[in-house]
Amino acid sequence: MKKVVNLHGRSSSVNISGVHFSNFTVQGRPVTSQTDSDATWNINAYVSNITFSTTPPTTPPPTTPPPTTPPPTTPPPTTTPPTTPPPTTTPPPSQSGACEVGYTMNSWSDGFTASIRITNRGTSAIDGWTLAFTLPNGQSVTNGWNATYTGSSGQVSARNVSYNATLAAGGSTDIGFQATHTGNTGEPDSFTLNGISCAIS
């Protein structure tokens, strides 16, 4: 900044507080500044005024670094798998006894007839059925009634016909067949109805 000091033609002392001045000349005569914070100048009487400049103070940049945000040190949460075991499936109850088979033979020297009564011992109707059984060795089916037979010896199956396809709960149907034998007149050991083991009466 610039300052003008008017001395009115006499010897004067000029006191400027709080400013540090650079060296300058007045009408060709050097004038030297003080170095303390209050500068005092003794000027001859022939000087009418002085114009001088001061260097504006500079503000140093801040030395404190800007704050930095450190990365989080806490690991992200992890999901723990459930510890509850999956529910177990209870197997269905055995359906053995849901049906019952009565088997009656009438044999002669080289043949026999077999009458079979199938009874539904379940609590609901059976719509469509197949009875399976195994004939003892030496026996062979020649014809049958009230069912369609598949196989003549060994593994044999009898499937319902149209008029007896439905067995009501507690209901029965009678089927049968004629067969030959070679001396073995034994009866089948087991019967299944639609794959379910039946009781034998």
Image (tube, rainbow, N blue to C red):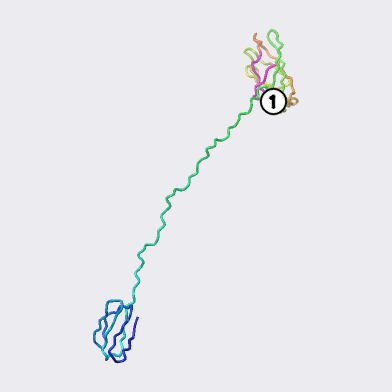
* Residue at left offset 25%, top offset 81%: 32
Query: Hey, which residue is sitting farthest right in the picture?
Result: 163
Q: Is residue 158 shown above or below 35?
A: above
Height in image: 89 above or below 63?
A: above
> What segment is highlighted magenta in the picture?
187-201
Residue 15 place in picture, x, y as percent: 31, 82
Q: Is residue 68 above or below residue 124?
A: below
Badge 1 element: loop
Q: Residue at x 63, y 19 (%)?
A: 155
Amino acid found under the numbered disc labelled 1: Trp
Judge from the rendering whether residue 90 lies leftward or rightward of residue 69; answer left or right: right
Q: Image quadrant for the N terminus?
A: bottom left
Assign the C terminus to one quadrant of the image: top right
- Which residue does the numbered mark 1 point to in the structure image? 129
The image quadrant that residue 20 belongs to is bottom left
Nearer-the-camera pick, 96 or 24: 24
Residue 51 percent location from the top left of the image? 31, 85
Q: Nearer the viewer, residue 60 or 186?
A: 60
Q: Position of residue 58 (x, y in %)?
A: 34, 73
Q: Is residue 198 magenta?
A: yes
Taking the magenta stretch, the answer to whether it contains residue 69 is: no
Total numbered labels: 1
Q: Write down the quadrant of residue 186 in the picture.
A: top right
Name the outermost residue toward the left. 29
Q: Position of residue 6 (x, y in %)?
A: 33, 88
- The relative height of residue 56 versus residue 200 in the rendered view (above or below) is below
